[in-house]
Amino acid sequence: MMSSQNSRNNSLQQTRPDTKPDAGFLSAPTLAALLLIFVLGTAAIYHATDSFRVVSTEDGRRLAIAEHPRQIPEAAVSYANGQQLQLSQALHSDSRVAIVTFIYTRCNTICSILGTELQQMQGHLQQRGLQQQLRLLSISFDDSDGPAELSAYAKRMQANPKEWQFMRVNNAVQRQALLDSFGIVVVPAPLGEFQHNAAFHVVTPDGKLARIFDYDEPDAALEYAAALSQQQTPLAQKQHTTAHQAAL
């Protein structure tokens, strides 16, 4: 009798459906929630990286400038020879594409690296006969850099004044606005020095920041500037040639 009862119980256990949930199974609502989180996260990353093309805010800013060149703000400037004028006038009257860098003459760190690259770039301008299309322009952000300091620095860099000029921004407010537009961050350091970032900035004669290259990309900056210079109007090229001949 007991054996028959046990057999009946075993039979019921074998035929009864197993209602215990599988530990590795996710319910449909859980899967839907996870999928929604994935989609929203991917969309947020897509938006933040500009369609996955950038990985930082600075990359995004540079990409935006490359696609839509920005007009740089106006500023009163002084060349190393003491000539004072507006930056827009300095760019337009020269009519060449400018490779712009920001420096201060007492800098012994990144400016030295930048100076070496610019010396080589000046040599490439001469070797390739690009003096009529391109020029180098170094702008000091140090208020203590006057014409004498800029001239001494230019001499130390062996800069040819027809191809590589130096200037300073006279007004502190305009100076900061200009630095901001180029993405240059300057932090005061001990002993009256500064910590700052550096790059090559390609600027058109009409005052637009067209492209930014890291300071270890001088060749790329030069090639881009040379290509951009070919887009100048014949009138602009003629104006610079006439001005250059008059200066000789």
Image (cartoon, helix red, strand yellow):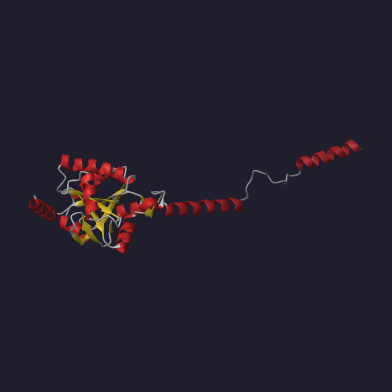
* Residue 89 image offset from top left, x and y in percent: 19, 60
Q: Nearer the viewer, residue 52 or 193?
A: 193
Is residue 205 rendered to the left or right of residue 57? left
Q: Residue at x 39, y 49 (%)?
A: 54
* Residue 99 image offset from top left, x and y in percent: 24, 49
Give the quadrant of residue 222: top left
- Quarter of the rendering occupied by the N terminus: top right
Q: Residue at x 22, y 49 (%)?
A: 152
Q: Nearer the viewer, residue 92 or 40?
A: 92
Q: Nearer the viewer, residue 236 or 148?
A: 148
* Residue 38 image offset from top left, x and y in percent: 52, 51
* Residue 141 image offset from top left, x and y in percent: 30, 55
Is residue 56 rendered to the left or right of residue 125? right
Is residue 125 rendered to the left or right of residue 199? left
Q: Residue at x 18, y 43 (%)?
A: 125
Determine if residue 26 is in view. yes
